[in-house]
Amino acid sequence: MGVFLETGRLELRAFTEVDAADVLALDGDPEVMRFVNGGRPTTERVVREETLPRLMRRYACWGLPGYWAAREPMGGGFLGWFEFRPVDERESAVVELGYRLNRAAWGRGYATEGARALIDRGFEELGVERVTANTMAVNVRSRRVMVKAGLRFVRRFTEEWPELIEGGEHGEVEYGLSRAEWTRGRGARGR
């Protein structure tokens, strides 16, 4: 599969085995992994045997992967990945949005740009009815991206995790966007 989605500054395409080194570097950065596992780098074995197969998985309800490698256009560098996958693998009505970008891409608007493009594609072409996203309550940068992408705060909640991550005592937050809210928002933007 070639490029799934292209914006002015991003190309999103399906993952392949060739992406292992880029994923290893991304998941090896303690700052990138801070809100994922407390900052522990992921080992090469875990990337090859667990992470990459998860990133390459296709979902039967739409025949597409749920994770997309993000690169700069025209063969540019690896920026990270975006998640846009069905919560229930049998239907595409509700999808989870996520993103993990390397530090060089932080603060440059890539996460918002990619999230908005995926949301638009989901509602326009993939039969999505609701987009949801979760993060730790203390992950202010990720929460800001969710809001800029058009999602609204839904709730604060707590989950039991095998290991405590600094800030985890403040719980998690969920943001969401329905097709109806997205449609109203497009009208307000003059699309």
Image (cartoon, helix red, strand yellow):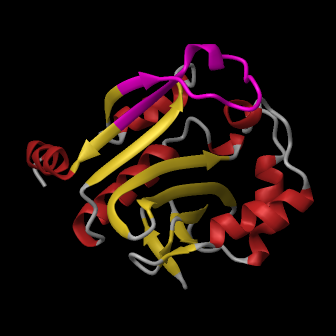
Residue 17 seen in this snapshot: yes
Residue 153 included in the magenta stretch of the image: no
Query: Which residue shows up at 37% across the image and 58% down it?
Result: 117
Nearer to us in this view, 37 or 157: 157
Q: Quadrant of residue 118?
A: bottom left
Nearer to us in this view, 172 or 102: 172
Q: Position of residue 160 (x, y in %)?
A: 63, 28
The total of numbered circles placed on residues is: 0
Residue 18 appears left or right of 142:
right
**From the viewer's perspective, is residue 11 above or below residue 163?**
below
Residue 184 appears left or right of 71:
left
**From the viewer's perspective, is residue 64 above or below residue 27?**
below
Query: Which residue shows up at 26% across the image and 72% down it?
Result: 125
Nearer to us in this view, 3 or 183: 183
Q: Position of residue 178 (x, y in %)?
A: 22, 47
Query: Which residue shows up at 10% across the image and 42% down it?
Result: 188
Q: Position of residue 191 (x, y in %)?
A: 13, 55
Q: Position of residue 154 (x, y in %)?
A: 32, 29
Query: Which residue shows up at 45% across the image and 54% down it?
Result: 114
Residue 152 appears left or right of 96:
left
Q: What range of the chain is rendered magenta?
A: 155-175
